[in-house]
Amino acid sequence: MSDDSLLKIQNLKVHFDTLEGPVEALHDVNLEVKKGQIMGVVGESGCGKSVTSLTSIGLATCIVDEGSIKYDGKEMIFHEKEKDPYLVLLSIILPYIAVLISFPIGFVYLMPFMKDPLFGFQIIMSGFGLIIISIIIKYFIHSDFREHEKFMRFIRGNEISMIFQEPMTALNPLYTVEKQIFEVMKTHKRLVDPSLSQYNRIISSFKAPFRFLYNWILSDRFSAIFFSILILTYLLVSCMGPNSISSWGTRFIVIFYASAEISMSCTNYTDELMSYCFLLIPLGALKSSIQSSMTRGDDSRKTLMSIPYVFIIIMFILWYDQTLLRSTIIIGGIMIFITLISLIKLNLWEQESDVVTDISSFLAAVFHSIIPDNSAIRSIPFTFTLALTYAILLWTPNQVVGTVLALIMTVSIPSIILIDFLQLDPAHRNQVIKIIEDVQIPNPSAVITMYPHELSGGMRQRVMIAMMMSCEPKLLIADEPTTALDVTIQAQILHLMRDLRDRKGTSIMLITHDLGVIAELCDSVSVMYAGSVVETGTIEDILTNPRMPYTIGLLHSIPKIVHSDKRGERTSLPIIPGQVPDPNTHFDGCRFHPRCPFADDLCRSIRPDMIEVNEGHFAACHYTERTINSKDVESSFDEFSKEFEGVGGEVVVR
């Protein structure tokens, strides 16, 4: 292994065990990532790119049959050392002896009709001893595997990071963005020193309930004043005399306790005070209308015009007096009031004519004065519930109210303190925000508090990129990092990855389908097909002088903008005929031969080796002399595409 080689994969062959038998995913993979290099891996879907990357960091579920993966000269694939066969056999047999012999005999001696139950207990304990001995033997004979796992845990994250292809399955849906990035940086010791000591964090957490109340008052002062008045009213009433039961309270309590037997010893002021609770309904509509208007930024005149005066007055009438005569007189006065309000809304005082000409506008103004707006309507269920609760609260003895409030505070206040204590340190939060800003996520302070399902696909991808780049690894494996991103963000992410290489010397293994991304970012390229590397070289070699027919077909398949005069008779996009073969399909020769226009008996029977066509440029093809002129190969693909019918990767020429 050369001194400048960081990751080197040699003759890698893996398979997956399935119910239908082993599936060979990688046949013979050879590639190398040098220090400070950006190496691209390109190929169609199903060529083994992701399996290669996952196997490189030990996360694939496949079984490695052959090959070697070395990171900075250290072997990444676990090769089990030769073990003493007698110890292995002993560790397997001892549990069977315990379960099949010791335990049954011991339980027989424990039966009541046996004369020596103590002997049975000793046999059972000896069985447990055999199992413990077996566990100890296995612990020592597998010590090399534990050392390898420890080494891999250190390598992953600290030395090698991977940007996964699907962020939704890689991110934990139960944790916020800041928590997940923080955990990665904490595990790999990338956090800055905290700004608060443990003592100061505890003191700050005890202040959290007061901060919560203070922030609520600042964010919604109108509601804070409203509820403060209600609380003060209750405190004043509770100090006015002994607890008593009101008729209003009785009416509503019976709704919930139909069988309740309630003593009707009421005083006049208590009964009247209970009725005042239901004035919260019109007052709530008034509050919601004013608050909604202030939120929209209306001036004082528009605020006054938005109040549903008639609705509020009618609610006052229903509360004050239900007699028909007095209500009729009051409603008649209300109609005059409606007219005046409507005239003000139409600005008729500023007009020279006293005649109302716009009847529809007048009726609309009258309708708005009678019917409250949406904000007032939405407040009615809440204010009715609040009025009902307040009435019950005044009806309930003070001792019961105090007990309930004490229980609520006993649960809520420690919860607020604990949640605040578990929050990130301000220095760590700022560090996470800076990382999120680096991947061009807007409003990072809000995004870090979100869960993965609240983000778009592109933002989840950028969070994954930020998480992996936060550890500043020596090798970054990026599996389709820009798939879900638009071209603007894609360019920013590619610039960020190149900047990471330039600043930190990070090597990057970039897996993608996009040859444009390869051309923009990579120094060298490896082309994979059907579980094997078929061509590798510098970016100039691959893009300007490809020698493997498959590579030429990929480049030929890129859509090009061509003037109609130069397009000729082409009516469809160029393609590579057929598709990637099934991994279970056996090939004696070249795996690309069913789709290759140059394939013959030699290609079908003998597998081509990687040959060096130029210095540092290798291609796996028997006929590299035919691929010197890429235009001729492209024409051959066009002719071949017209004459085939393909199913399942097998091409049948007409």
Image (cartoon, rainbow, N blue to C red):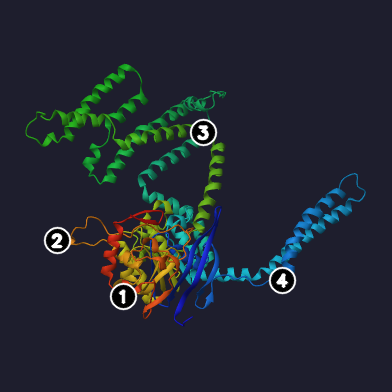
Most foreground residue, 585 or 320: 585
Above or below, 555 against 342 in this view is below
Q: Secondary structure at mark 3?
A: loop
Q: Amino acid at mark 2?
A: Asp
Q: Amino acid at mark 4?
A: Asp
Q: Is residue 127 left or right of residue 119?
A: left
- Sooner in the amino-acid sequence: mark 2 or mark 1: 1
Q: CA distance from mark 2 to mark 1?
A: 30 Å
Q: Amino acid at mark 1?
A: Glu
Question: Which of pointers 3 and 1 indicates the residue nearer the eye?
Answer: 1
- Sooner in the amino-acid sequence: mark 4 or mark 2: 4
* Residue density around tag 2, few if under 14, some if 14–19, many if 20 or more, within 10 Å: few
- Sooner in the amino-acid sequence: mark 2 or mark 3: 3
Q: CA distance from mark 1 to mark 4?
A: 53 Å
User: What label does residue 540 carry, if any?
Assistant: 1
Q: Which residue is mark 3?
A: 241
* Whether residue 203 is visible: yes
Above or below, 196 against 263 in this view is below
Residue shown at 35%/73% (left/top)?
624
Q: Amino acid at mark 3?
A: Gly
Q: Secondary structure at mark 4?
A: loop
* Residue density around tag 1, few if under 14, some if 14–19, many if 20 or more, within 10 Å: few
User: What label does residue 565 carry, if any?
Assistant: 2
* Residue density around tag 3, few if under 14, some if 14–19, many if 20 or more, within 10 Å: few
